Image (cartoon, grey):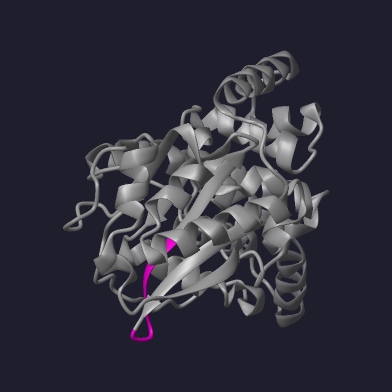
Amino acid sequence: MHVEAFPTSPDDIEDAVAVFMHHRRRLFGIAYRMLGSTVEAEDVVQEVWLRWQKTDRSVVLSPGAFLSSATTRLAINVAQSARLRRETYIGPWLPEPVDTSADPAIGAEHAETVELALLLVLEKLTPVERAAYVLREAFDYAYTEIADMLEVSLVNVRKIVSRARRHLLDERRESVDAAEHRRLLSAFVSAARTGDVASLEALLAPDVVSLSDGNGMRGCARVPVLGRARVARLATYRQLWRDAVPELVDANGATGVLVRRDGRTVAFLTAAASQHGVHQVLWVFAPSKIAAFLDSRSRVTAGPGLMQGGGSRSAVCRG
């Protein structure tokens, strides 16, 4: 979409920055929930900022609606191309975790909609279904507002949201509360570090599945690992925990674990659990995704531009 540039004064630019920064975290929250990638979400937010600069803002009745609409449409386009790119991804693809302690606004509105396990389920929706669901369930936009953003009829929006809800209900389980989730994950890490397979199996649901995102890294399981015995055996892999220091972190509105060795982060771990125990173990080993999580800690002070990120390379991959 071509946006005509309009001449602006320094005061106009200052006002544009102020308005954009007021809405920026919400824009990132929409894009991140749509894409499951902090890097791609930041790219979308940056593009929206560029368009906002070039827009004749004097005719914009609602800056919030304009920016949210632009973010949603751009995220849909990125999601459509991302689906094609992920077909060549080696092994399970997991969303990039985001540090919600550094930027709590990402998880402030309906925090369950940013949980890593739910973002993974959202990947099964079409980009338009995902957009409608995110806008309605995570940010409480009215159906009429969503219809305008997606440029579809009000009747269709209601059908799309209803269809997405039904699909997610079929996929999701009732989760334990935050305190119990933290307890289970801490117990999981403690048993894994000491090689206590029996204690690990006691924490796991019978149909537990372990997913490892390494994009072809050596030693990473390239298919889902199923069942208590196999998941527990892989979790106790000695080379992963040798000289490792685990750190509990707030990731995607829940507890996660960074596994560090020699000052480097080599893995990220979290889990999904119900009253029957841990039913999903999620490992992230891909260096770019670990770097994105570490970079997300600086988002609270980020301006309209993109964050500048470093990174670390994982030395061990197993899970």
Q: Nearer the viewer, residue 167 or 192?
A: 192
Magenta stretch, overall SS: strand
Residue 77, horizontal then vertical, whole percent:
46, 40
Q: Is residue 311 visible?
A: yes
236 relative to 117, above or below: below
**Residue 92 as seen in the image, left or right of residue 249:** left
Q: Nearer the viewer, residue 263 or 235?
A: 235
Where, by quadrant of the figure, is residue 230 drawn? Answer: top left
Residue 124, horizontal then vertical, whole percent:
46, 29
Q: Nearer the viewer, residue 66 or 273?
A: 273
240 relative to 109, above or below: below
**Residue 229 as seen in the image, left or right of residue 305:** left
Residue located farthest toward the left when viewing the structure as drawn: 218
29 relative to 126, above or below: below
Residue 193 in magenta stretch: no
The residue that appears at 35% across and 44% down in the rendered structure is: 231
Residue 318, horizontal then vertical, whole percent:
27, 57
The residue that appears at 57% across and 27% down in the rendered structure is: 129
**Residue 127 as seen in the image, left or right of residue 238:** right
**Residue 143 as seen in the image, left or right of residue 90:** right
Residue 282, horizontal then vertical, whole percent:
43, 49
Where, by quadrant of the figure, is residue 287 drawn? Answer: bottom left
The residue that appears at 81% across and 49% down in the rendered structure is: 62
Q: How many marks do you count on the picture?
A: 0
Q: Give the residues in magenta.
A: 262-268
Q: Is residue 73 visible?
A: no
Q: Nearer the viewer, residue 9 or 240?
A: 240
Residue 263 in magenta stretch: yes
The residue that appears at 72% across and 32% down in the rendered structure is: 146
301 relative to 149, above or below: below
